[in-house]
Amino acid sequence: APVANMYLARAWARASAIGDVRERERTDAFAARIADADASTTAASARDDDDEKSRPNQQSSQAAPSPSSRRRDARHGCAAHREGAFIAAFSGPVIAFRELGPRGCAIGEWRADADDAYVALAWQEDAPDDDVDDLRRLRRAASAPSPSYARTALRDVEERVMARACAVTEKGEAHAFRATSSRAPLNGDVTGDVELERVLALDDGERATCVASDEREFVLGTDRGRVVFIDWSRGTETRAADVRRRESDGGATSVDWCASRSTCVVRFDSGAVCAAEIDGDGGVRAMNWIDAFPCPSTCAAFHRRTRALALGTADGEIRMYDDAMTAEASKPRRVLSVRAFGFGVEDTGAVAHVKWSNDGVALAVGWRRRGIGVWSDSGCLLMCSLHHGAAAGGHKDTRRSVTFADDLKGDGGDDDEDEPRVGACLGVPAWGVGGLSLFFVCLVDDQHHTGGVAKLLEYSLARNISAPQIRARSSVADDTHAQTSDGETHVLLADDRAFVIRAKPNGQLYNHQAICPAVYVDAQWPMRLACASADGSRIAVAGARGCVTYNARDEKWTMFGSVAEEHEFEALALTWIDVPHGNAHSPILAIAARFGKPRLFSTSLKVSHRVQFYSRDRLGGSATLGSLPLPAEPTHLSACGSHFMVGFESGEMAVYKLDMHGDEGAVHPVRESSGQRRMTTMRNGRALVACALTPDIAGDAPSEALVLTNARELLLVDLTDNHAPVTILRDVTDFWVSPRARESSAAGQNRDDGDESSSGFESAEDLSNGASVSLENPVEYGCVFAYGADGMRICYFPRDGARQIFRLGAACVDVDRSTKNPELEFDRELYPVHVSVRLSRIVGVAQKLSFSDAHGESPYFSIAPKSHTIVPCVLRKLLSAGSHDAALRFARAERRQTPHFTHALEWLLFTALESANRDAMTHAALKQSLALLREFPNYLEIVVSVARKTDNTRWEALFTAAGSPSDLCRHALRGDRLRIAACYILVVDKLEGEVAGRAVAIEVMREALAAHDYRLVEDVIKFLLRPVRVTASGEEDVKPSLIGRVLNIIVPPPNSVLSLGARADRELTLDVTEQGILKAHLDALAREKDIFNMGAFVSDTSFDGIGYFTHETTAGGSAYIDNFSTALEAAVMSLRRRAAERREKATPSAAQRRRNESQYSLLAGDAFDLSTSSTDTARANALLDVARTARCTDWSLLIATTLGRVDVLVDMFRADGVLVKPWRDVCEKCAERSGDQELKEFLKKTVDEVDAACGRG
C-alpha cells in the first residue's frame, strides 16, 4: 500500500448493508467471550481495591502509581497479526484468538489462573521497518515462510496458518502461544487450536509489565525499568539493558522495538519517555529523554520505519515528533487536539492509548473517559466518536463499576473524573492487515450490565486509491461521455467494496458503495488494488488473486469465467489505458501480475511477471487482448493516453505504447536502444510509492514523470535519462498532476455581463460544458497539487514546460502554500482525495457519525464527499500577476460550471480583506479583487455578505475601496434588490453615523412597503426603534398608539440588520414621521379594500391593527366604509388580482427563478424566512380577527363576506339580528348590479348558506 494511504472509518456491522447476519452473530459471540470474563475481573479488581485501602498510605500525592493501579488500567487489549490475518483479544484472565477475514472464525481461547490476568500482547512478526506493505508481505509469506508465520495455500489442499504470540500477565510472567488454523478446501470449514508453548518468568522477582516483538525476539519491559530480550525459538534471555534514569521513574508501561535500527522506546510510570539505541550485547549507545512538557505523557507510540513518536498527554492532546532519537519535548512537529471541535479534557479525559498504523500515515487514539478517533499524520481528523451527542447526553451518568487509577494521582482513586464512561477506550487499538480494519476495546452500554460492558469493536476502513493524473479541461470537453456524466470518478477501497464518488450534472457530489461479489470476496479477501478508467465508466478491483471489474453505468460486476483463470495470477498493479479505437476511445484494462503455480512437495513458486491486457467488458479467455513479459517484479503502473509506464521494485521505470489492431493489442517499447528498451533508474536509492506520467505537449511519448518516494519526496524524473531527478517538494503524502492543456480558440471569452439587476450570473451567451481553454490560466500550463503535513500546496510548472525544471532546477517552480494563500486552507475534518480541474475544485471526504439501528451501543460512520473550490486561488494568482483581463475571462468561464461560484468570489474578497488588515501599507490585493468583482452583477451582494461575516472593525478598509455604503445601498434599491439594500443599513449606521443610517433605513422601508414585503418592513422597524424619550419632569412621553406592544426582541447574530445591541431591553418606539409612513401605507390599502395586504401588514409588522380599526373606521377616519356595496366589489376584485398574481408567481421565468434563488441564498440565517411565511388566506383571517376584536362591524362583515366565512357571519347575525336584512339587501343589490357571473354566484351561495344556518330558509 502506498504511503499516501488515507483511512476512513465506517461501521463494521454490515448486516444492514448486505444482509450478512451470520457475520454479526460471530462478532457478538466473540465480544461475548470478552464480556464473560468481566465479572471475575471485576471481583479481582475489587479485592485489589480493598487491599489497597487497608494499607497505610506511605506515598505522597505526587508519587508514581502503584503496580496494581497500573495493571487495572491495562487489563483489556487486542493485537492483530499483520501477516497472518489473526487477531487476539484479552480481558482479565481470558485471551481469545480469531481469524480475520469475511468469515472471521474463532480459533480458540486460553484462560490463565483465576488470580491472574493478561495485561499486554504482541505477535511474532516481521518488524514493519521496511517499505513492503502488509498486503505484499502477506503474499510473500506464502512463498517464503518465516519462523513466525507459516501458510500453505495450495489449490485442492487444506490451507493451514500458524503464528506465535506472547502475552504478559499481572504476575509478571510471559506466556508464549502458538495459534494454528486449518481450512478445508471443499466446504471451507475452519478448525483451530491454541497451544501454550512456554511460560517465562524473570529472575529475582522482577516482573514483566509490557511486551514488543519482531521476528527473532520479543522484548519485555519490566517494573524495574529494564528491557529484556528473549529469543523466540529457545525461550532464553539474549541480552538486557537498563534504560531507567532513576528509581523514581518507576517501571515500564509500554515498549516499542525496531530491530533494524536497534531502537527501543520505553514509557515509564512517571510519564517520561526514553528512546535508546541498544547494541547486540545490551549496551546503550545513545539515549534521548522526553520529559513531561507541558504536562506528563500518559501513553506513547513509536513507528519503527519512520521513527515517528506520538505521545498522549493528560490534557487530552497528542504530541507528534518526527524522530524519537532527536525529539525535544518542547518542540513537537504537530499537536493534535479535539478542542477545536468543542471537546475539552473534561469531556475526553486524558489520552489512554495511541497506535500508529502499519504504514505510519495514521494514528489511532483512545481517550480515558470516552471517545475514540483516527488522525492522519498531516493533522486531519478522519474519525471521531465524540461527535455523537448521545455519548455526552444520554449516557452522561453511566459509569463502570471498576475505575481506572490516574497515572498522575497515585492510589487515591477518590476522584471519579477518570472513570471510563460509555465510549471509553479500554485497551491499545490494533490495526488489521493492510490497514483496512481497526480494532478498539471500548466500554459500551448494555442493558444487562450496570455501567456498561467491554466489547471488541472492529471498524472497516477505506483507502484512497484514486490515480494521481488529473484530466485536462480540454480532454474533458472533447469527451462526449464526460460531458453528460461528469467524467470524473474517485475511488476509495475497503476490504470488500469500493466507495465510488461521482458528481451529478449540477456538480453535487454523491457516494455509491460498489460491494464486490460475495464469491470473490470469500475466496480472495482482502481487496488490495483498485483503479477507475479516465471516463469513470469502469472500475477494476483486485484481491489476493485474480481481478473483477465494475460497470459504473449498469452497476454490474464482471468476473473471470472460471476459478482456474482467477487463481492463475496475482495482480500487482492496475491501470486503464485510453486507446483510440476508430473514432472513439475505449478503456483497456492493464494488469501487471505475478503468474505462478506451486511446485510439488515444495512451498516455493515458479513465477513469471507480465502485463495482461483485457477488454473493458469481459475478463479471461477471448477477452485477453495481449500480454507484455517483464524481466522483474513490477510494483506500479501509470497510463497517459495510449502510453503506459511500468515501475519496478528496483526503482527502474520503462515506458511502452499500446496500439490496437482490431481485437488484438500490440505493445511497443518507447525509446529503444540497440533493440532493447531504455529504463530510467532513480539514482538516489529511493523506492517508488506512486508515479504519474506527464503528457508531452506535442503529443509524443511522455518524457517526464512525477514520482513519490518512500521518503515522501516528490521528484520530477527525466524518462530520456539525460537529466538527474529533481526534488520539487518534500513531506508529501498525496499528489495530483494536472497536465499542460492544449491551446484552443478563446471562444466565449467576450461575454455579456448580463442584466445588473439580476442577482444571479445571467449571460447573454450560453457557456458550453468544458469551457474554452486559455493558457492565461496558470493551472493550464501544468501544475501539481500536493498534500502533506504542510497542508495543500500547488506547484506551478514554468510556462515553457516541465523540462525547464531540469535545466533551471526546482527554484524555477512557483509554489503556493496555505500559509501564503488562505484559499488553500482546509477544514480539519476534510481529507483530499482528488482534484477536478473541470469543476475547479478539490474533492475530499469527511465522516458523518450516527448509530446503527440494530446496535445502538456502537457508533456508525459513513463517508461524506465534500469539495473545496480552487477558483479563488487561481483568481488571486492571476490578479497578483497583474492579469486582470485574464482573471475576468477565467471567472466568466467558471461561473456556470463551478458550484457555489458566488461563495468562491466571497472567499476571494474575504481573504483579500484579511491580507489588507495584516498589511496596512498596501491594499493592492483588496483593490484588485474589488475591481474584478465590479464586473459581475452581484457585486453588491458579495460586498455586503463579506461585511456581515467579518468584524465591523474591518468595514472601514473594505468600504474605503468598495465605495460608500449608502451609495451601494441606494444602488441596490434602484435595482429592486431590497433585501440586499437592507443588509447595508447597519454598515451605513456604523461608518456614516446614525443620521445617515436612519435615512437609508427609511428609504428601504418605503421601497419595502411599495413591494408589500412586510417581513422586511418589520426588520427595518426594529432597526428604527429607539428608547422612549424622558421629559424634563421625569415622565415618559406618551407613546403613539401605532405600535401596539413593547417588542420582546430576541437579538439575532451580530452584524445582522435585526441587531439592537444594548437597546433590546428597554421600551422602544418609532418617531412620529416613521409612524406616519406606516399609517399612510395602511390608509392606502384600506381605501383600496386590499384585505390580503392589510392582513399581511398587520400580521408581519408590529403595527397596532386593533387601535387602527378602533380610531380610523369611524366617520371621517381613513378606513371608514361609506358604501358597503362598493367596498364589497373592491374587496372581491382585490381578491382576484391577488389570485392572478399568485398564479403568475407560481410559474416564473427561468431568469427570474435564478434571480430569486441568488437573492435569497445570500440571506441564509436572516429572520425573513420565506418557507415559514403565512398564506394569503391566513393573513386575511388574521385581519378578520383584528377587526372583530376592535368591534369594527363594517370591516368584519366585509372581510367575512369576501372570504366566504359563513361561520363568522352567522355568529355576528346571531349576536345582532338587526344586521341580517341590511347585509342581505346589499349583497343582492351588488349581485344584480355586477356583470360578473362568478361574483353573482358567489354572493348568492353565501347568502343562501347564511340563511340556511340562521334558519330563515
Image: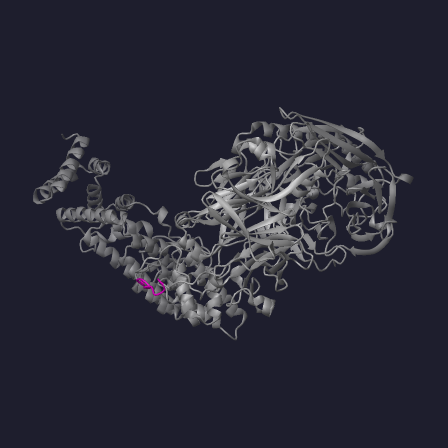
Q: Residue at x 22, y 42 (%)?
A: 1203
User: How many numbered markers are drawn?
Assistant: 0
List the single residue furthest toward the front: 674
**Front residue of this view, candidates 138 and 170:** 138
List the single residue furthest toward the right: 204
**Residue 178, image x and y in percent?**
77, 32
**Front residue of this view, candidates 836 and 1183:** 836
Question: Left of 57 or right of it: where is 473?
Answer: left
Q: Is residue 1033 above or below residue 595?
A: below
Does the magenta segment cover residue 531?
A: no
- Answer yes or no: is residue 1151 visible: yes
**Residue 82, image x and y in percent?**
69, 40
**Front residue of this view, candidates 112 and 683:** 683
The stretch of residues the image draws in magenta is: 747-756
- Answer yes or no: is residue 1035 visible: no
**Residue 490, image x and y in percent?**
51, 47
- What colour scheme does the image use? one colour
Q: Is residue 287 above or below residue 95?
A: below
**Residue 677, image x and y in percent?**
60, 54
State the quadrant of the C terminus. Answer: top left
Q: Is residue 1048 above or below residue 389?
A: below
From the image, give the main secondary structure of the stretch colored magenta.
loop
In the picture, residue 979 is in which quadrant?
Answer: bottom left
Q: Residue at x 14, y 41 (%)?
A: 1238
Question: Left of 40 or right of it: where is 1103?
Answer: left
Does the magenta segment cover residue 752?
A: yes
